[in-house]
Amino acid sequence: MDDGRPAAVPAAPPVLRSAGATAEEVAARLTRAFAEIANTRMADVPFCNSALQVESVGFRSWDGRWLGVLITPWCMNLMLLPQDHAAWRHVRYGDSQGYALPAGVFEFISAREPLVGDYQSCSLFSPMFEFGDQEGARLTALAALDALFAKETRAGVEGPGTPLGPIIDLKAEAPAPQRATVSKRDFLRGRWRAEADEA
């Protein structure tokens, strides 16, 4: 029955724009945007590490998206930003989307900033007090990116202490035993490598 009111129109998806034409442009835009946040919304917030500054590192093209790490005084996040619009998986802001990287499945939370546009982030560290200087944070960020693309890492970090799934050898009759739980921090510190060396 028509009550005279217009039919509800579904919300249109956001208008996406590429985060940049090059990895350097993406990193520069992200750094400018979050430096502005650091100087305004996050100014004088007690859980910020004053030894650190905003920096975007290691950005590269991955599967039609830009992927890298954002370092701030309050967190270190993996960041995904649009490159090829057809490859971008938009989900409602605040919801998460899983991506399969060589090291495992990682959950990214959808967000938007006016100076950046749409992006998705996966927390590596928060807060940042275990880092004494910018160089240490930068080296950790770059090591995390290297580990993400190493199939032998098998971290599958969806949160601290996320258990690794069993590693299956398709040529064997029975699956290999399940490995020990690895937290995100252990993963970044190379605990998986130490265990492999001990085996």
Image (cartoon, helix red, strand yellow):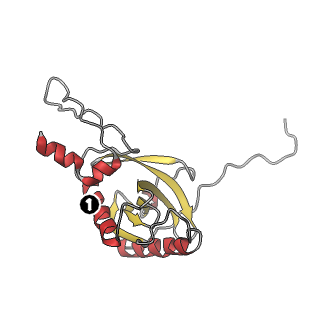
Secondary structure type for disc 1: helix
On-image quarter of the C terminus: top left
Residue drawn 53% across the image and 50% down it? 91
- Residue bearing mark 1: 143
Examine the rendered structure and indicate whether residue 167 appears above or below residue 197.
above
Q: Amino acid at mark 1?
A: Ala
Residue 166 position in % (x across, y down): 26, 32
Examine the rendered structure and indicate whether residue 155 appears above or below residue 174.
below
Q: Nearer the viewer, residue 100 or 78?
A: 78
Residue 149 position in % (x across, y down): 26, 54
Locate residue 28: give its quadrant: bottom left
Q: How many marks?
A: 1
- Judge whether residue 93 can be spotted in this image: yes
Judged left or right of residue 85, residue 62 is: left
Kindly give the residue lying farthest to the top in the view shown. 173
Judged left or right of residue 169, residue 162 is: right
Residue drawn 87% across the image and 45% down it? 4
Judged left or right of residue 168, residue 85 is: right
